[in-house]
Image: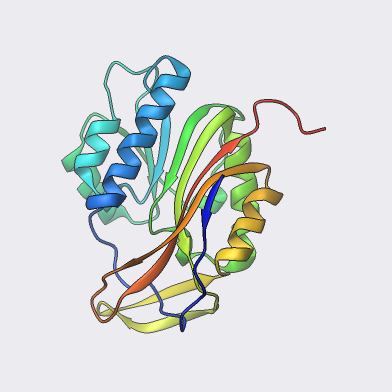
């Protein structure tokens, strides 16, 4: 397991939701291809914050897949944009912490720039739910906050109030393992934002292929 956790800098809140480019985009596409090879078919993939990059969503979605690629977002406007960009996929307007999905029904779940907007107390339960939704050996790819900061609402985040909650890298990794994931990679990357750089913990984790002893 590759794990790279540099010493924390002063906590800087990730501020913008933007298109995934460069290493972010490559990471997503490579992991979709990994799932494809593992399962011998196109993945059924639940993508939170789908609007992060419609080009990547198009590459992941295949109309010949076993089921359409489902996406979830709380905001009706974001789903409207997603439908315009990838009309062949399926969409659900819902709070991701309240989703009721059948167990072992997905090959992969992605969550880019969305988990940092959850109350910290709700993150462990969501991770446990995602672990149950995934088939044995299923992949979870996500970005989380790297630096710990308290739950709070920022009054002016790109012009609107926005909630943030960051347990920090070590607690995020502990939550993943407590939920039953095996963390394959965990890398902290500094990314440019509108006012200053922000640090994200990027993880690739899998469900176990057999029950732990």
Q: Position of residue 48 (x, y in %)?
A: 40, 48
* Above/below status of 190 relative to 4: below
Please report the residue visible at 71 percent of the width from the left and 50 percent of the height from the top: 178
Q: Quadrant of residue 104?
A: top right
Callout count: 0
Query: Can residue 183 be seen at all in this image of the molecule?
Result: yes
Residue lying at the far right of the rendered structure: 213
Please report the residue visible at 17 percent of the width from the left and 41 percent of the height from the top: 85
Q: Position of residue 74 (x, y in %)?
A: 40, 55
Q: In the displayed structure, does residue 29 sit left or right of residue 41?
A: left
Q: In the displayed structure, does residue 20 sit left or right of residue 168?
A: left
The quadrant of the rendering that contains the N terminus is top right
The quadrant of the rendering that contains the C terminus is top right
Residue lying at the far left of the rendered structure: 84
Q: Quadrant of residue 189?
A: bottom left
* Above/below status of 177 relative to 121: above
Q: Position of residue 187 (x, y in %)?
A: 46, 56
Q: How is the image coloured?
A: rainbow
Viewer-side residue, 198 vs 82: 198
Q: Position of residue 95 (x, y in %)?
A: 48, 53
Viewer-side residue, 11 vs 109: 11
* Above/below status of 11 relative to 177: below
Q: Quadrant of residue 16?
A: bottom left
Query: Can residue 43 be seen at all in this image of the molecule?
Result: no
Please report the residue visible at 20 percent of the width from the left and 49 percent of the height from the top: 81
Viewer-side residue, 169 vs 129: 169
Viewer-side residue, 180 vs 95: 180
Q: In the displayed structure, does residue 7 sit left or right of residue 49?
A: right
Please report the residue visible at 62 percent of the width from the left and 51 percent of the height from the top: 176
């Amino acid at each position: 397991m590759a794990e790279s956790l540099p010493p924390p800098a002063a906590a800087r809140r990730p501020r913008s939701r933007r298109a995934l480019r460069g290493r972010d985009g490559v990471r997503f596409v490579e992991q979709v291809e990994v799932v494809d090879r593992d399962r011998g078919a196109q993945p059924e993939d639940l993508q939170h914050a789908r609007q992060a990059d419609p080009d990547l969503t198009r590459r992941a979605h295949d109309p010949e897949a076993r089921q359409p690629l489902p996406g979830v977002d709380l905001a009706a406007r974001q789903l409207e944009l997603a439908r315009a960009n990838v009309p062949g996929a399926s969409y659900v307007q819902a709070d991701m912490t309240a989703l009721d999905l059948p167990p072992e029904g997905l090959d992969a779940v992605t969550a880019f720039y969305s988990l940092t907007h959850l109350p910290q107390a709700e993150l462990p339960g969501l991770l446990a739910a995602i672990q149950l939704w995934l088939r044995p050996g299923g992949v979870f790819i996500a970005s989380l906050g790297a630096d710990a900061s308290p739950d709070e609402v920022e009054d002016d985040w790109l012009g609107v109030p926005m909630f943030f909650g960051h347990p920090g890298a070590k607690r995020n990794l502990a939550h993943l393992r407590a939920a039953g994931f095996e963390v394959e990679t965990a890398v902290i990357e500094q990314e440019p934002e509108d006012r200053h750089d922000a640090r994200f913990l990027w993880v690739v984790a899998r469900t176990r292929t057999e029950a732990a002893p």
